[in-house]
Image: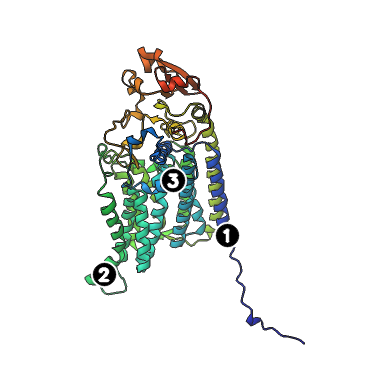
Amino acid sequence: MVVSVSTRALPAQRPLRRLDARTWLGVAFSGCLLAAFFAVPYLPMVDLAQHAAQLSIWLHLGDPQFADASRFSLNLRTPYIGAYLLARLFAAALPVIAALKLLVWLSVVAHALAFAALVKRLGHAPWLGLLGLPLAFGYAFYYGFISFNAALPCCIGSLCAVLAHRERPTIRSGCELAALLCLTLVAHGFAFGMTALCALPLLLGGAFDPGAAPSPTRFLRGCVQRFAPFVAPALLTAVWLVPGSSARSIGLTLWEPRFLSLAQVPALLLAASGADLAATLLGIAMLALVGMSLGRPAREREKLCPLVLMLLGYCLFPLSLSGFSPLHPRFAAFIVPTLLIAFEPRRSPALARLPAWVLVTTCVWLALFLTRLRAFTTETRPLTDFVSRMPGGLHLRPLVFESGSRVYPALPVAMHLPAYYFAEKGGRQGYSFAMYPTSVIRYVPSVTPTMGGGAEWHPETFSADIELDGYDCFLVHSERDRSSELFGEREAEVELVFHEQDWWAYFNRASDRARRSAAPRGGKSGNGGV
């Protein structure tokens, strides 16, 4: 018997969706960065050591063996809490520094994904999306602003949601935009402000319906529909931030226009300063690649406003706002996204060569980053050795005279490196972010910091007569031995216990903790020393 089977009865098999070359390259580059982050002791991020110290304190606030618990309080009413919440979650299974490395890596990957989504939303050349990875390593990365770095993907995601919501406002699009705006606010207040500055003109322009007769009622209804998502972050601010003290001033507000410093923007996309020639050239190359894909200015003129506002913000924002500075270089992170919004996609045969140039430029950047990271590890090996050899629990006073780096031009990367001792071995810091009202971990009002704000930049203000008795160890970063000028007549009261390259450590002979460990010994680094 012959049985015939109709092919119509068989379900059609869908072909497996293949990942394109851009996706594979993005995965490969991200994996390479993850391996590099965990292969080195420290990342070249100025403030990261202080964030590690903050996270270490948070982990041990409920520890009865943490003698200093009474000196600190947990501040959850700060617009910098988002990144810390994730890091705290990771730190439940990882050492503090590893948890922060994972957080930084995830911020980088999220930035790349959000940037690629913006490129796709606007219809630009898809290969531009690959630039989202190197563009995550700009000014904020090297200064270690982990909260701002974590906020940037939310900022770019919010811009994508704004573009979708202005085209066709629905309850769903409004809820998505509201959620992203709230995430941005929780991650970083200043980043939320810049995002709102970009979003408002886009939504305002979208409220006009060019196909309908002018009507104030119709325009008002369009504004309500498009601006409704901002109610959520406004309520969050009123309920969560206003009752706190994070908005308190810590200094002066200084204003200084700087239009000529726009020349530094290409460098700030990939480095901390225009003094970095290699980063400047790569930044120019990436801006040129973006420029290749841009056509005429957008027909909707409101799309030009975010770019203009970001450029003006970079040039005119206060040099110091209530003591917080510098804030204006962070506007550079918004330049490329707002450029893509301001211009239509270009349709040209010349774009056929764009993928190759994007790939080459990204590979050159990655090679430079990995080479410098290896050199930075060599440069900071003395600090790694110091942390591993010193006993735990010391009261440490940092004195950093040369904060610069031979690897990263004009980056004061050594400024907070001594805080890694506290993050790994415990004890008590001389300088701590806990003195600032926006910090997640703060000193209780009864504690007076022994190093006030600005003391980290001015080690010459150290006074042995006032401070010697308050510390067990003095860690000095200097090209020469400064023991005589630092300790003066009390030099006999300290003992040099560590010297490697430009790092010098002196024990206070009168300190019980230092005396019990007069012969420094090695030990496994970890969080248990607190």
| Amino acid at pointer 1 | Asp
- The answer to which of marks 1 and 2 sits earlier in the sequence is 1
- Looking at the rendered structure, the kind of residue marked 2 is Arg
Quadrant for the N terminus, please: bottom right
Question: Which residue is at 34% across, 53% downward?
Answer: 195
Question: Pointer 3: residues within 10 angstroms few (<14), some, or many (20+)?
Answer: many
- Check disc 1: other Cα within 10 Å, few if <14, some if 14-19, many if 20+: few
**Residue holding disc 2:** 221
* Percent position of residue 192, x then y: 33, 52
Q: Residues within 10 Å of mark 2 (few under 14, many from 20)?
A: few
Q: Which mark is residue 20?
A: 1
* Residue on which the image places disc 3: 87
Q: How many marks?
A: 3
Q: Nearer the viewer, residue 36 or 329?
A: 36
Q: Are marks 1 and 2 in contact (CB under 8 Å)?
A: no
| Residue 294 versus residue 373 in the image, above or below | below
Percent x, y of residue 58: 39, 41
How far apart, in angstroms, are the residues tagged by discs 1 and 2?
43 Å
Secondary element at tag 2: helix
For marks 1 and 3, the one nearer the N-term is 1
